[in-house]
Image: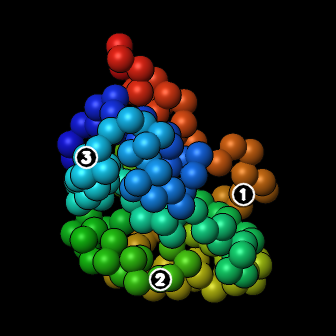
Amino acid sequence: MTRLDALDARLLLALEVDPDATALSLSRSLGIARNTVHARLRRMTETGALRGSSLRVDPAALGYPLVAFVSIALSQSDGSFSVAGLRGIPEVVEIHSTTGEADLLVKVVARDTADLLRITTGMLGVRGVTRTNTTVSLVETMPLRLTALLDRAARPDG
């Protein structure tokens, strides 16, 4: 992934304020050429620095208000199959490889606790998954935030 510079950060901060801003309005507010805006947004999208807009959707609005984190121990010989199998479960919204007792930390969303049981039971059926441990989130105390990091990156001294 390409490292973002101060102008990239300023562009992303402007999108944070107005996610629906046009390239023309961004170019005017930042004092840069519209082609520069297009080129930078394209590059950040292609390199994965700028992710899709589905990340802004609240799963609760789709009927999935319950959030849980599942620690998963894997059979070392079947790890790649396990990740592929877990990716096939629609309620799995994030997967992180970790150190420690668990091999993966998986964020899932569910309709209710009965649905969560269905999902975690299904995870145990995925090839290579040997054990799970589930923690239910009571409330999202602080959602993902990157604005403070963007503010820092947008400064000339970075």
Q: Is residue 31 left or right of residue 40?
A: right
Residue at x 51%, y 69% (from the top left corner):
54
Q: Nearer the viewer, residue 11 or 124?
A: 11
Q: Position of residue 5 (x, y in %)?
A: 29, 31
* SS state under label 3: helix
Residue at x 54%, y 47% (from the top left corner):
16
Q: Which residue is mark 2?
A: 89
**How many marks can you see?**
3
Direction top: furthest residue: 157
Q: Is residue 80 above or below residue 44?
A: below
Q: Is residue 107 left or right of residue 51?
A: right
Q: Which mark is residue 41?
A: none
Q: Quadrant of residue 109?
A: bottom right
Q: Is residue 72 left or right of residue 5?
A: right
Q: Amino acid at mark 1?
A: Ser
Q: Which residue is mark 3?
A: 36
Residue at x 29%, y 44% (from the top left corner):
33
